[in-house]
Image (cartoon, rainbow, N blue to C red):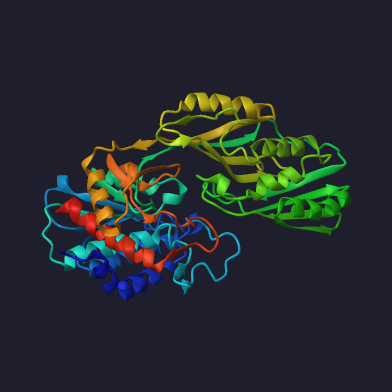
Amino acid sequence: MIDWQKEAEARREDLLRDLDGLLRIASVKDPETATSKRPMGREIGEALDYMLKLTKEMGLTVKNVDGYAGHAQYGDFDPDTTVGILGHLDVVPAAGTWTTPPFEPQIRDGKLYARGAIDDKGPTLAALYGLKIVMESGLPLQKNVRLIFGTDEESGMSCMNYYREHERMPEIGFAPDADFPMIYAEKGQFNPILVPKYAPEMTKSLVRLESFESGLRINMVPDRAHAVLSGDVRPLIEAFEDFCREHRVKGEAELSAGQAMFTLIGASAHGSEPAEGINAGTTLALFLKDASLQPEGKAFIGLLNLLHEDFHGEALGVACSDEFTGPLTVNPGVLRFGTEEGDTQFGLTLRVPVGADYGWIRAQVEEQVDAFGYRIDAVREVGSHHVHPDEAVIHALQTAYAEVTGDEPTLLTTGGATYARFMPKGVAFGACFPGKPMTAHQADEFIEVDDLLKATAVYARAIYELAK
């Protein structure tokens, strides 16, 4: 009988060394450095090269799929038997205030801090080391095990679409990119871009909104917002400190050359759980709600106020729920205003229950935003994903989780989207344990080192259970 936890502990130093090297690569998508060989940018390309080199040195058969993704496989059995493990190497921008630099990993009080520690470099390395345990233990397998490394999970998953078009995607497996015990159902997504219906006009007003900027990605709750106003701004400057104190946020107002810049600091969170953060953009708009703005500025701030803390879409008219995945959620993630045509837009992500009607959602959103002079310019829709609880893959992973942890392997659902949806019988499996904070997309993101080792043990047992 193998002691999976003991095997993971024996590889602690090696795992932390290899993970440290990966975490030091600032693999944020960067179109400016993109090339044909590195379509997501230089740093993500370096992360993919790092993983393929590492896995090749471990004795796995590796392939770089045109820079969009790569895989490392153990076994040479019938391709129909392949078990897939899908992790991603890209990370969201390291927004917010960090205690230590986000790409200089540091262990403090048993926690490994770095961007990507829990989402998704730490879990991906844990899965790799789980396979390494199985390999080095000499356990006989009858199926291939293929780790697939994606590069664009945080910005649309074009990497896995490309991989699926050019390589054979496994039918069964897991994505180590969420919560334990297991996520068997994922919401869909309705991600609209809202723009003004009319070109801006030069109109007079007591106060003029010159610019507004908040948010980097729709799948992050914006933690910082900036607004520049001109005109009679002194009363606003005087009121801002009281507003920030009342709403328990940090802010600063500066006056220069007749213009005032307002900066408000919120708290980031994953866009699928907007209530877990403080949206700096909508909160700053709440402060500007009663300002005597020009019509375009007033419409922009008015729509932001409609969206403020409308976590389940009641104000948008799209509130709905189902028994599998619960209520719809809304995150206004990218918020821009400018005085030139094309400067102004809203980027939203709506996480949609399994049974929701996308056509109805679109109609409701269009009706609500039309009242503010806005329209839907483009939409990216992502379908939901659901694996039946009686499938063999779920029973296998439940067995592995229960054996290693001694805990009940209950089934969960999520508003997040993982690579699991690219496999017909794929589920999200770890690596955040029950009761532990999920710090993905937040400043000071971390994973507890002991949890990383426990996840490695769970993955080793799961790989063996799936592929034996």
- Picture coordinates of residue 255, whole percent (x, y): 83, 58
Give the quadrant of residue 45. bottom left
Q: Nearer the viewer, residue 316 or 37?
A: 316
Q: Is residue 431 left or right of residue 371?
A: left
Residue 169 appears in the figure:
no
Residue at image position (72%, 36%) is 302
Residue at image position (56%, 45%) is 274
Residue 427 appears in the figure:
yes
Give the quadrant of residue 464. bottom left
Q: Is residue 141 left or right of residue 387?
A: left
- Picture coordinates of residue 142, whole percent (x, y): 11, 53
Q: Is residue 344 left or right of residue 206?
A: left
- Picture coordinates of residue 292, whole percent (x, y): 84, 39
Q: Is residue 130 left or right of residue 352?
A: left
In the rendered image, the quadrant that contains the N terminus is: bottom left
Vertical relation: 426 (above or below) 267: above
